[in-house]
Image (cartoon, rainbow, N blue to C red):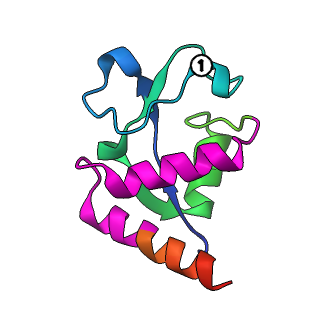
Amino acid sequence: ADGVVIIVSLTSLKESKDQTVILRKSEHPFLTHDTCPFYGQAEKTTCQTLHHYIQNGSAKIHRDGSPAMLTLVIDGMIASDFTKERIREFMKEYRRRKRAV
């Protein structure tokens, strides 16, 4: 929304304390083992910053996840006890705007 994005890293299921959402390795070619979004480190940033991360190799573009996977990750971001409140509120507002369209 308005050039602002939420970024969340993925971490190994076996090392994750937050297992609100579990992505199975069969759900996306990028996943080599069962994985969890690391909601505790999710951050709000700009598209420009994300583009910079891609250019300097800190982030990589992969094939899009399915709409169902994206919905699951967003639902988990809202539900997780580890998500920062400002991130949770941003995602709730994103949901409200998306439904209004």
Mark 1 Cα within 10 Å, few/some/many (few <14, many 20+)? few
- Whether residue 75 is visible, yes or no, is yes
Q: Which region is colored magenta?
A: 63-91
Q: Is residue 11 above or below residue 33?
A: below
Q: Residue furthest bottom?
A: 100
Q: Is residue 89 above or below residue 63?
A: below
- Name which residue type carries label 1: Lys
Q: Is residue 27 left or right of residue 72?
A: right
Q: Secondary structure at mark 1?
A: helix
Q: Nearer the viewer, residue 12 or 54?
A: 12
User: Residue drawn 45% across and 54% down?
Assistant: 75
Q: Position of residue 4 (x, y in %)?
A: 54, 69
Q: Nearer the viewer, residue 5 or 77?
A: 77
Q: Nearer the viewer, residue 78 or 85?
A: 78
As for residue 48 lying within the magenta part, the answer is no
- Whether residue 2 is visible, yes or no, is no
User: Residue drawn 24% across and 47% down?
Assistant: 82
Q: Position of residue 101 (x, y in %)?
A: 68, 83
User: Residue drawn 52% across and 73% down?
Assistant: 94
Q: Position of residue 52 (x, y in %)?
A: 61, 50
